[in-house]
Amino acid sequence: MNDGYEEILVKRQPRAVDTVLKILVIAAAVVPVVFGLVFAFLPAMAIGVVLGFLGYYFLLPQLDIEYEYLYVGGDIDIDKIMSKRKRKKVASYNKDNLEILAPTGSDQLASYMKEGKVLDYTSGDPGVKTWTAVYGSEKEAAIVKMELTEEIAQDMRRYAPRKVFFS
């Protein structure tokens, strides 16, 4: 078996929006509780506890994201891991549907960038080299940004030599 295999775990950097949402979740829980304590109004306290629980359970895990790339023989599966508790399969891309793979910002990608929606599965760190892949299907093109290694790009070039570029 001569298939390439690699797993990559990429932690998304916290964004400014994430910090604001965390503050809003905490405020939505604390303000009604304080109001209920000051004015001895128990329903407000109950609302604060419920809002705090809902925000903690449903919203906060969405803010701590890691992406796991599983590369096997030219195919890439991407999973999203939320707060190191929940795993969700996000996408699966087949080497047969690959149209182009190049470093993000490459000239070869210029004509493809207008075709579809850009899916960003990177950490958001500007110092890390990212790759952009365009996968075509019957429905529409998927433009996918990932943080791949040079070894994966070299292995993908073995499967699609005219579709993988390094500059």
Image (cartoon, rainbow, N blue to C red):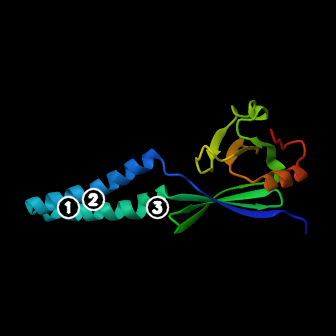
Left or right relative to 29: residue 76: right
CA distance for labels 3 and 2: 16 Å
Label 3, on which residue? Answer: 61
Q: Quadrant of residue 132?
A: top right
In the displayed structure, 136 sits above or below 79; it is above
Left or right relative to 41: residue 63: right
Give the mark nearer the N terminus: 1 vs 3. Answer: 1
Left or right relative to 13: residue 3: right
Label 1, on which residue? Answer: 33
Q: What secondary structure is found at the residue carrying circle 1?
A: helix
Left or right relative to 43: residue 26: right
CA distance for labels 2 and 1: 7 Å
Rendering coords of residue 28 (x, y %): 28, 55
**Amino acid at pointer 3:** Pro
Q: What secondary structure is found at the residue carrying circle 2?
A: helix
Rendering coords of residue 46 (x, y %): 22, 65
- Name the disc covering residue 29, or none: 2
Identify the residue shown where x is 63% and y is 45%: 127
Identify the residue shown where x is 74% and y is 31%: 110
